[in-house]
Image (spheres, grey):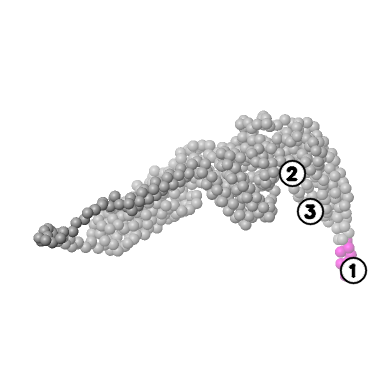
Amino acid sequence: MRRVILLLGLLCCLAASGWAAEVQVKAELNPAAFAVDQAAELAIIVNGASNAQPELPVADGLRFRQLGQSQQSVWNNGQFSSSVAFTFSVQAEKEGQYSIGPVKVRADGKDYLTQPLRCTVGPAKGSFSAAAPDTAPLAAEDVGFMRIQPEKETFHIGQIVPFTLKAYFKPGHRIHIKTEPRLTNENFLLQSLDAQPIQQQEQVQGELFTVLTWRGSISALKEGAAPLAMEVNADLMLPTRRGSNSFDQPFMDDPLFDELFSSYTRKEVKFASPDKLVTALPLPAKNRPADFKGAVGTFSLAVAAAPADGKLGEPITLKMKITGSGNFDRVQAPELTDSAGWKVYPPANSFSGKGSKGEKTFEQAIVPVSSSLKAVPPLRFSYFDPAAGDYITLTSEPIPLRLHSAPEQAPAPQPAPPVQPKKRQFVPPAAGEPVQSVLHLQPLYRQRPFQLLIAGAACCSVAGLLLDLRRKRLEHNPGTVRRRQAERQLARDCRAMREAIVAGEQEQFRRHCREAVQHWIGTLWGRNAAAITMNDLREGLPADSPLLPVFARLEASGYALEPLAEREMEVMLQTVRQELVKLA
């Protein structure tokens, strides 16, 4: 028992010696030299403390914004050590030499100072003016890069090949994607692509990137080796530096205040993935079926006919379903193996599914014209299977029929001869019999009630015609059409925002909230909705408009990846709905 107590005491002493390690703080800047239009990363590292918090660094001409923190604990050879790292982004207002620190750190109730650092800020990498946007392309490595990775590098013409496209963006930049990714080579056809990319963060060679990921599929149009690449247009948002704080109020120099109320100019950039060499193989000519129409993939066939008990000369409906994965745009209706005795009509088709997977349904009317038919003949569908490297022909089973001859029609009865009406003979009155006469016989159209009725009907017709003309004119008025479209779009965006709040989808909420403001303002101002920016809202809306802080918060949340609280999203939804209606 005494040995156990001594062992526990020894362990406690070792642990106490580990916890009692001296607190050390240091600062690291990476890189120490950077351009004025880029950002560096400052790390404050605290070793040996259980609780630490640095102050926000302050340096003339530099702006700091905290990015986050990470913690690490290690038990090694009886020694326990812990460290915590606080990271900040650093941006300069102009070129020059700058000093950072010492930075004050509060750790375990005591104050510590880091060593001072120096950095060099050079000219902007992109040759552009901050006062107006430029269309000269920036170097891709200054902002980010793209990569495309197909699942296969060798495939057949017409084969659907999935791919993954990723766009990597360096921290410290604001990027607005303007266009959907597109292929740069006409040898390939884009079959499908995600409507919205997935946003996440990844580390590449120790550096953290914001990554947008699209998934889609392509097919080859020409055989042979060809480079596969995609590109996308984007706007790089460049901050316009605010002037000095003439009111000498500390909160005006807060980085969050700069993020929300700084103005931005747009710099057009283009990202393109490096060429990925792929090879498209031709479809083999050997064993190619006569009914092959270009379908490539893996499919199954199901056929039904109704009615199976019919009459000669009456149509029978064939319903054919082709299910599987492949290029459904080249899938044609199966053909009868023997069309003798049948009158065949063109089929109608419909497709249900997503991308290259789904089901294509054909409905076709066929009419039996021969009394010797006993069954619907088999139907045949051929396709090329890339996995097997050969053609596959699917054949359905015959469908038995019972045909009845159409009954002979009885002769139509002969119509009876028309009965001639008897003519009334005029009998003159007898002598001395009084004769009745009508002194005033007035035509109907000259009677007053009839005339009033006709006049009223004419007035109603003219009024209805005028109202119809006015309705059509309003319906075709561009302003009215745009206004109704904007009202419907606002209702859809509000519903989508409500659904996003319930589902906790912040990215969907930000997108629909931003689009609601842009569509409505663009309609009122007669401008392109997608081109409405924060600068446009500041210029066109009153300075106290509640829409300004809402739009600014959306941009800050999207670019800085700052989460929105559920209550905050509820308030933003109500504010957008009420303020947009007031603007009307």
Q: Residues within 10 Å of mark 3 (few under 14, many from 20)?
A: few
Q: Give the farthest residue toward the bottom.
A: 1
Looking at the picture, which amino acid does disc 1 mark? Arg
Amino acid type, label 3: Ser
Distance, label 1 to label 3, CA atoms, is 32 Å
Tell me which numbered mark, 1 or 3, is placed earlier along the sequence.
Answer: 1
Q: Judging from the image, what secondary structure is the residue with disc 1 in?
A: helix
User: In the rendered structure, are the residues bearing label 1 and label 2 in contact, judged by CB atoms less than 8 Å apart?
Assistant: no
- Quickly name the residue at label 2: 256
Q: Nearer the viewer, residue 352 or 183?
A: 352
Q: According to the image, label 1 marks what residue?
A: 2
Q: Which residues are magenta?
A: 1-10
Q: Identify the element where label 3 is drawn.
A: strand
Which quadrant would the C terminus be assigned to in this image? top right
Residue at image point 56% right, 51% down: 491
Q: Is residue 396 above or below residue 206?
A: below
Label 3 belongs to which residue? 73
Q: Earlier in the sequence, mark 3 or mark 2?
A: 3
Question: For this rendering, which residue is in front, 282 or 582?
Answer: 582
- Amino acid carrying label 2: it is Leu
* In magenta segment, residue 73: no
